[in-house]
Structures are given as structure tokens and as C-alpha cells.
């Protein structure tokens, strides 16, 4: 089965942008500043020290090669014996340095990634940015993947690349000096022109060979950055599509939509495969160069050193030393080429991480324009909620909803009902500070004293206790208090399962989740409660009973209920209606207010 009308989203091709690299450096470099600076610099300097020691051990091994082969050529038994003993010491030293590199490198990678993840999560969740980015369509695709996975690929390879770069620079300096001092100059006879002396000829050979091979590979591999970026973007979309199926599993199953989803996933993964194959072909082109130049690296120095060995100017040990140094210089010169694919993968992930940072910064002006700071009522047990002479508009300024007065005094329960699309959810967003108001004055206590119970009750991952304490994980509450809240809302059967960890949003029915949300209100005891059709899954009698119990347990709380149906016969003091007039919803008073009958 195929879905011909479905088009998998494209990922733009891109090249290495120095501005993105600089922005990532400024953001991620914060790890080496502030409270984390001491540990970060200790790990960095410790790693640098071990890398220098590693190069020193490699140079020592190079010197040992010369000593060993010269002793072998001279049949020096005593020298060979000493060389074997020294070799053991070098091996132990290299092993110890290797352990130090592994510990400092991996600790640095873990700590740096943890710092970036914490700061990304803080930016994403602070000021409700995650919500505003989502509703405005400005959120980068798959933010959860960017935070969980791209942070890893933007840090771990960079540390490894940094290690490789340090080793390449230090190693190049050390082994070029060996080529210079041991190789010396070479005198070339040019017939009638006489002898021509080439100073440091082995250094020139190494640099010429390395720059030619590396330059050719850079030229052939240039498109790889864009290919890797497009592949990573396609894989992100594929993961996001599977996540959506899981989140909507019941709806997909009820509608028998598995075959359609399978076709959609197939189109997504076809894109992944196509972009992987582009990388495969590019790797094939690079392999022509690597496989041609690689086998020549250990042979070239032997060919250029052979004339001086035959003439007796070099010993066998010096020839092997030059050959090993030549290889090390080639490794240093070709570092960029050998790591080109990793550089491309790092850049693609760093760019995706910076997309979140940039989006969070860009949404802040929009947040500033949303919901001016409400007036604060006087401190007390209850709080007045009031939205007066208001007109609510959409992002383009088009009026959506208006009214003269929506007020609820401490201890009062006000019910607002209206047909679908008359603006109930918009009113809730205004109270939550998530919607701009074109006109009007809002009186509301601090957000920490207001709790909103939405129609689809959210239950976090973890234990039932955590679901009751949400959104304050540090709230101290006795088990008796929690069980009492559950019992009041007819959930006494859950009282013994407070510490049970489960997917409670799947274990409980819609009605049980809504009862649990009401029990959560009893636990937190807010001054203002906004119920957004929060009892819609229950029958009318149950709704009346729960509202009555809520008012009895929290007599000073101000309650505003928004629902599609009129208020039950009891439980609320007043009722307001959202009516559509002149094509626009308007909040008006009901003909017959609902009288409170709390038992």
C-alpha cells in the first residue's frame, strides 16, 4: 500500500556556516564559565596533560625503535636486553596514560553534555516557551530528539575531535623535528648543473605528500556536510512520526489506521534510505583516494631514505625511525580529512541544538506581548478573580470574544458555559497568561496560587504520589492526607498504590483521571481554581457531588468552571453564558442564576 498524496518533509541542504559554529561555541562554552568552570577546566587541563604525555610516550617508542634496530644490526646482545626492559616500561607508561585519557575524556563528555541538556531544558520550559513555540508554529521539528540525542552528537565527537587535533598538532611538531634532524639534507647530482643540496628533504616529502592527498580528499568530500545534515533531519522526522503513532495509539487502533500509518512511515524511511545512500556513494568516492594513498604512506619514506641507507649515511634504525615519523606526520596532516565525516555529523547536530536556542530567544518578544501582568488581589484565604470590559483577539488582532464582566469573589463558584467554538478554551488561556488580550483588566493572584484543571487531565510519568503532588515535586504531604484526598473524590481504592510506578494516564479511565485531578486540588489547596470542562467524563450527578465536596473542603477558594453544558442544578452561585451575537461570542449573564446548594 502507498499513500501517493503524502509528501515526506524535505530537509534543506546546507554547508558549514561559521556563524553557527560561533553561536554554538558561545552557548556551549558556558560550561567553562560560571559555577561549572572549576570542574570543567580541571578536566580539560588534565586531559591536555595526558595527551602531551601520550605524545611523549609515542616519541619515546619511536626513539626505542631506532635503538632496537641499531642494536639488532650490530648484534649487540646487551643493548637488545636493555631495549626489551625499557620497552616494558614504555608499555606500562602508555597504558597508564591511556587510562588517564579515557577517564578525563569520558567524564568531560558526560559533564559537558549534562550541562547543555540542563540549560536547553531550562530555556525550553521556562516562561512556557515550549507552549508558545508549539502554538505559534515556530518550534523546530523534533525538539525532544534534539535535546536528548543531538546534544550527545554535538559534544562527544567534538571532544574526540579536539583530542585528535591536539595530538595532530603536538605529534606533527614532534615528528617533523625527527624527520628534520635524523633525515638531514639530501644532495642530488644534476649532471652538468652540479650537486644540489635539499635541506630537510624528508620534511618536504612528508608535507608535500600529506597536503596533496588531504587537499584532494577535501575537494572530493566537500558535499558530505550537506548530505549528513539532510540524513539526520530525515531520521529525526522518522522518529517523530513513530512517536506520534505511539502517543495516539488508541485512536489509530480504533480507526484501523495501521496500514495508512505503515505507508506513511514507509515514505519517511524511504527518504532516510535515499539520503543514507547519497552518503554511501560519497564515501565510495573518498575510498578511491584513501585506498590509493593509504598503502603508499609506509613505502614512500623507505623509498626516499633508501639512497642514504645504501650510501651508509643512515643506519637501519634511523631508516625505521624516519619511516615511523613519516607515518605520524601523515596522520597529523590528514586529521581533517580522516575526521571529515565526524565533523559533518557534529556540525549537523550542533546546528540542530542551536535551532532550539535561537527559537527560544526569538519567541521571547511574542511572550512579552501576551497577557499583561494582572492586578494582584490583597493577600488572604481567598482571592477575587475578575476580567472586566474585555475583548480577546487572535494573533492578527481579529476580535474573538468580548464581555463586560467575569468576576468571582472568594468562596464563590461561577459557571460559564457555551457551545463549541465560543471561546471557553481561549478564556482559560487568558487566565493562564497564555493569550494576548486586546482590551480589559485582569485581576488574579500569583500564578503559584492558581490551579487549572483541563479537560484532559495530565498525569506525569512516575508514581501515583507524584501525580498527586504535580506540579510541585518537593511538596511535603503525608500519606494520610493523600489518601484522604483520593477517598473524597471516590478513589479510595488507589490509596494503597501511592508509590506504584505506572503509566497512570493509560491505567486510569477518563473519569478516574478527572477525579484524580480534583483530588490534586485538595492536596494543593490553591486560592483560585479554574475548571476547563474538567468533569466532562462524569455523569451530571457525579459532577454535582464532586463540586460540592470541593467547595466543602476548600470553602475560601474561588472557583470558575467553564463547560459546554449548563451547570448542574446545584454547586454554583452564578452562571454566565457565552452566546454568539453578530457572528462573535459574547459573555452575558444567564436569565436564571444558579443558586448554591452545598451539602
Image: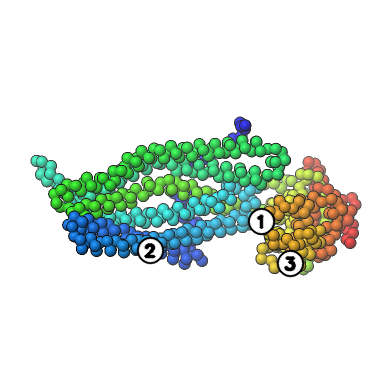
Asked whether residue 437 is in view, the answer is: no
In space, the residues marked 2 and 1 are separated at their CA atoms by 44 Å
User: Which residue is pictured at 56% across the width and 49% down the height?
Assistant: 145
- The image quarter in which residue 470 lies: bottom right
2 and 1 marks in contact (CB < 8 Å)? no
- The residue carrying mark 1 is 461
User: How far from the left and from the top, in percent, is residue 139?
Assistant: 60, 48
Q: Looking at the figure, which quarter contains the C terminus?
A: bottom right
User: How far from the left and from the top, in percent, is residue 242?
Assistant: 61, 43
Earlier-in-chain disc, 2 versus 1: 2
In space, the residues marked 2 and 3 are separated at their CA atoms by 53 Å
User: Which residue is pictured at 44% across the width and 62% down the height?
Assistant: 103
User: Helix, strand or loop at disc 3?
Assistant: helix
Residue 96: mark: 2
User: Helix, strand or loop at disc 1?
Assistant: loop
Residue 164: mark: none
Q: Residues within 10 Å of mark 3 (few under 14, many from 20)?
A: few
User: Which residue is pictured at 30% across the width and 54% down the height?
Assistant: 172
User: Helix, strand or loop at disc 2?
Assistant: helix
Earlier-in-chain disc, 2 versus 3: 2
- The image quarter in which residue 557 lies: bottom right
Front-most of residues 315 and 370 = 315
Q: Is residue 341 left or right of residue 143?
A: left
Residue 479: mark: 3
Amino acid at each position: 500500500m502507498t499513500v501517493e498524496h503524502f509528501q515526506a518533509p524535505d530537509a534543506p541542504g546546507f554547508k558549514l556556516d561559521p556563524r553557527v559554529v560561533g553561536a554554538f561555541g558561545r552557548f556551549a562554552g558556558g560550561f567553562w564559565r560560571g559555577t561549572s568552570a572549576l570542574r570543567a577546566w580541571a578536566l580539560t587541563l588534565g586531559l591536555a596533560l595526558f595527551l602531551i604525555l601520550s605524545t611523549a610516550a609515542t616519541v619515546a617508542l619511536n626513539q626505542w625503535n631506532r635503538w632496537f634496530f641499531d642494536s639488532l644490526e650490530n648484534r649487540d646482545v646487551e643493548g637488545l636486553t636493555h631495549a626489551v626492559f625499557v620497552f616494558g616500561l614504555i608499555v606500562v607508561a602508555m597504558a597508564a596514560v591511556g587510562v588517564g585519557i579515557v577517564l578525563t575524556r569520558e567524564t568531560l563528555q558526560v559533564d559537558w553534555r549534562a550541562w547543555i541538556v540542563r540549560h536547553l531544558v531550562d530555556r525550553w520550559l521556562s516562561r512556557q516557551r515550549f507552549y508558545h513555540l508549539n502554538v505559534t508554529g515556530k518550534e523546530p521539528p523534533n525538539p525532544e530528539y534534539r535535546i536528548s540525542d543531538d546534544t550527545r552528537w554535538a559534544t562527544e565527537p567534538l571532544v574526540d575531535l579536539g583530542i585528535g587535533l591536539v595530538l595532530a598538532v603536538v605529534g606533527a611538531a614532534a615528528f617533523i623535528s625527527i624527520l628534520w634532524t635524523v633525515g638531514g639534507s639530501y644532495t642530488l647530482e644534476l649532471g652538468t648543473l652540479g650537486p644540489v643540496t635539499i635541506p630537510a628533504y624528508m620534511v618536504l616529502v612528508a608535507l608535500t605528500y600529506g597536503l596533496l592527498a588531504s587537499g584532494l580528499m577535501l575537494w572530493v568530500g566537500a558535499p558530505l556536510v550537506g548530505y549528513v545534515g539532510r540524513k539526520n533531519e530525515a531520521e529525526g522526522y522518522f522518529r517523530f512520526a513513530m512517536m506520534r503513532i505511539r502517543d495516539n495509539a488508541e485512536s489509530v487502533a480504533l480507526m484501523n489506521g495501521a496500514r495508512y500509518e505503515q505507508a506513511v512511515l514507509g515514505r519517511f524511511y524511504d527518504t532516510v534510505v535515499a539520503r543514507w545512500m547519497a552518503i554511501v556513494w560519497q564515501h565510495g568516492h573518498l575510498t578511491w583516494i584513501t585506498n590509493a594513498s593509504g598503502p603508499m604512506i609506509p613505502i614512500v619514506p623507505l623509498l626516499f631514505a633508501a639512497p642514504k641507507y645504501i650510501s651508509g649515511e643512515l643506519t637501519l634504525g634511523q631508516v625505521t625511525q624516519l619511516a615511523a615519523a613519516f607515518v605520524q606526520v601523515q596522520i597529523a596532516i590528514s586529521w581533517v580529512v580522516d575526521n571529515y565525516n565526524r565533523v559533518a555529523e557534529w556540525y549537523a547536530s550542533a546546528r540542530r541544538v542551536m535551532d532550539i536556542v535561537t527559537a527560544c530567544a526569538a519567541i521571547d518578544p511574542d511572550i512579552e506581548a501576551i497577557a499583561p501582568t494582572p492586578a494582584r488581589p490583597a493577600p488572604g484565604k481567598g482571592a477575587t478573580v475578575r476580567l472586566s470590559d474585555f475583548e480577546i483577539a487572535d494573533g492578527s488582532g481579529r476580535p474573538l470574544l468580548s464581555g463586560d464582566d467575569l468576576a468571582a469573589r472568594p468562596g464563590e463558584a461561577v459557571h460559564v458555559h457555551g457551545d463549541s467554538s465560543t471561546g471557553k478554551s481561549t478564556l482559560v488561556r487568558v487566565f493562564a497568561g497564555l493569550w494576548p488580550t486586546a482590551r480589559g483588566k485582569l485581576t488574579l493572584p500569583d500564578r503559584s496560587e492558581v490551579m487549572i484543571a483541563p479537560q484532559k487531565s495530565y498525569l506525569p510519568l512516575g508514581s501515583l504520589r507524584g501525580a498527586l503532588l504535580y506540579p510541585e515535586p518537593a511538596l511535603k504531604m503525608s500519606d494520610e492526607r493523600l489518601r484522604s484526598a483520593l477517598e473524597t473524590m471516590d478513589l479510595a481504592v488507589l490509596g494503597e498504590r501511592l508509590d506504584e510506578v505506572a503509566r497512570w494516564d493509560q491505567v486510569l479511565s477518563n473519569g478516574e483521571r478527572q477525579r484524580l485531578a480534583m483530588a490534586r486540588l485538595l492536596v494543593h489547596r490553591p486560592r483560585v481554581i479554574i475548571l476547563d470542562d474538567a468533569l466532562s467524563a462524569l455523569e451530571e450527578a457525579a459532577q454535582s457531588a464532586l463540586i460540592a465536596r470541593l467547595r466543602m473542603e476548600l470553602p475560601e477558594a474561588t472557583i470558575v468552571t467553564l463547560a459546554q453544558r449548563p451547570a448542574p442544578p446545584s454547586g454554583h452561585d452564578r452562571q454566565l453564558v457565552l452566546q454568539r451575537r453578530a457572528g462573535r461570542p459574547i459573555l452575558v449573564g444567564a436569565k436564571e442564576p444558579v443558586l448554591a446548594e452545598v451539602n
